[in-house]
Amino acid sequence: MVGLLGSLSQLSEEGLLNCIMYLSGVSGSTWCMASLYNESDWSTKLETVKRNIIKRLTGPSVSSLVKGEKLLKYYLTKDNFSLTDVWAALFVAKMVNEINESGITKQRNHFSSDPYPIYNVIDKKCKYDKLNADCWFEITPDESGYSLTGAFVNSQCLGSQFKNGKKIKEQPEIDMLYLQGLCGSIIAEMEELLRLLLSLIQDKMEPADTSTSQKSDEQKGREVLLNLVHLNLCAMKDQDPEVFLQNLTELLKDKHQGTEALKTPEGKISKADLEKYTLHVCSSVFDWFGGSGFGDDVWIAIARSIEKIGGWIWGKTYNYLNNMTVEGVDHSVLNSEKREYEDAGLLINSPYFSVLRKERNIDLIISLDFSAGDPYQTVVQTAKMCQELHIPYPKVVIPSEDQTEPKDFYVFRGYNKAPTVIHIPLFNSINCKGEIKEYKKRYQTFQMNYTSEMITDLLKKAALNIINNKKNLLTEIKYVTEQKKMSKLLK
C-alpha cells in the first residue's frame, strides 16, 4: 500500500502521472487505490491526499465495536457470507484504519484527470483446475468479469443472483471495504482470524460475564464462544487446551457430551473432530442459551464467523454466468451457481493480465513490483503464461549478475504487438545499496503495522526509484510513442 503511494506521488512530482491511462492493482496495492479513488480527481491534489492517508493510517484506530457492527451488517445483508466479510470487517478495517462503505460504481465519471482503476482477483476454482485463461477476474467502476475470456457484468450487479443471464435476486453492491478484503487476503491466516474474533468477543463481553457470581444463560453462551475460540487457537498451536476443555464441559453440562472425545490417545486435540464440534456448538449455542443473539445480534455474526473458519471459504458469490452459453468460457464456470474469488497474489502478484486484455491495446506497462520474494518472479511467470495462452508479451531475460541483487530499472522491449514492459523492483541495489535483505526483513508482507517513521522511510525508497529513473522512463515513453506514430503511418 505505502510503496504504491510513494511511487505515484513521485510520478506526479516528475510530471509523469498524467501519462498513465490505467492503474491496475492486486493485493495490498488495492488498499492504496481504494484510498486514492475515495477522492475525485485525486491526481490533481496528490500531496494533500497523501498527507490525509498517512494521517489516517497513524491516527486513532477503528473501534472493535464499530468493526463488530460492520461484521453484523455483512452477515445480515448478504446471502453468501464468507471469511472475506470477516477479514474485511475485522482485519482490513484495522489495517487501513477506516470502514469505506461506498460502492465502486460511485467512481464512475468522477475521475476525469485520473488513471482508470482496475482491481484484480482470481477465480479460485479456475486456479485449481488450471484454467489459466479464466483465472483473471477484474473489478472496475463500470464492469466486472474475466479479463481474458471477456465475460462481464455491470459492477453494480456483481454478487446478485443470475440465471440464464437474467437477474433473479438482488444483492447489495459490494462496498470498498469488502473489495479491499477480497483483493488483499493473501496474508490471511486462520490464527490471525481467530485472534481477531477473540479480541472482538473480549470487547463485547460484559463485566458480569467474567465474574464468579451466578451467570445467566446469555452470559454462559458468550463464555462458550470465548472458550471455543481459545480451544481452536490452542489446537492450532499445539498448546495445552485443558483449561478450555474443562470450561466447555462445565458450561455445556446437560446440553452436549463432554469434550473427552476430542482428544487423541496422545492427549492432543483431533482437528477433524474439533471442526465438527465447533460447527455443532456454533449452530446450537443460541438454542441452548436463551434464544437469538444474547441480546445483541453481533453475537450471531461472531458465531457464524467461527463456523466459516473451519470451512475456509473465501469470496463466495453468486455466479452471473450461471446456466449461460458463452463462447470461450469453460463449461465448469457456466454450470456453477456460485464462484469463489481470492487474492490474485496467490497466483501471480502483479496485475498484468487485466492490462493485457486485447481491447485495451496497451503499448507500455510500468510494473512497480512490491513482491516480498524473488523480484523477477512476476515478470517471468507472466511471460511463461502468456506464451502458453498465445498472448503477445516481450521476451524476458534476467542478467545473471543481477540474480542476487536487482537493479532499479529493467526494460523488456515489445515487438510484433507485444507491449514493452518496464520492471522496477521496490528494493534494489541502487536505493538500498547493500541493504536489500535488511529492508525486505524490515518491511515484510506479513507485518501488521508500520510506525510513522517506517511509512516515511518506505515512501522515500519508493520515490527514489522514480527520481533515479525519470530520464529512462521518458526515453521509453518517447520511444513507444514514436513507434505508435510510425505504425499508423505505415497502415
Image (cartoon, rainbow, N blue to C red):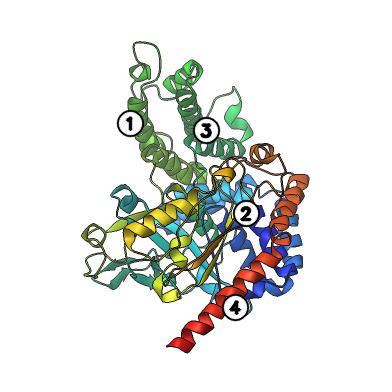
Task: From the top left corner, tell me how far across and down residue 370 is, in percent.
Answer: 59, 51
Q: First in sequence: mark 1 or mark 4?
A: 4
Residue displayed at 57% across by 78% down: 481
Q: Disc 1 vs disc 4: which is toward the camera?
A: 4
The answer to the question of whether label 3 and label 1 lie on touching residues, with beta carbons closer than 8 A, is: no
Residue closest to the eye, 135 or 256: 135
Residue displayed at 57% across by 80% down: 482
Tell me the element at label 2: loop
Q: Quadrant of the C terminus?
A: bottom left
Residue 316 appears anywhere in the view: no
Where is mark 3, residue-wise?
219
Where is mark 1, residue-wise?
276
Q: Is residue 423 left or right of residue 250?
A: right
Q: Disc 3 vs disc 1: which is toward the camera?
A: 1
CA–CA distance in space, label 4 to label 2: 22 Å
What type is the residue that disc 4 sits on? His
Tell me the element at label 1: helix
The answer to the question of whether label 4 and label 3 lie on touching residues, with beta carbons closer than 8 A, is: no
Q: First in sequence: mark 3 or mark 1?
A: 3
Residue displayed at 65% across by 75% down: 18
Q: Disc 4 vs disc 3: which is toward the camera?
A: 4
Q: First in sequence: mark 2 or mark 1?
A: 2
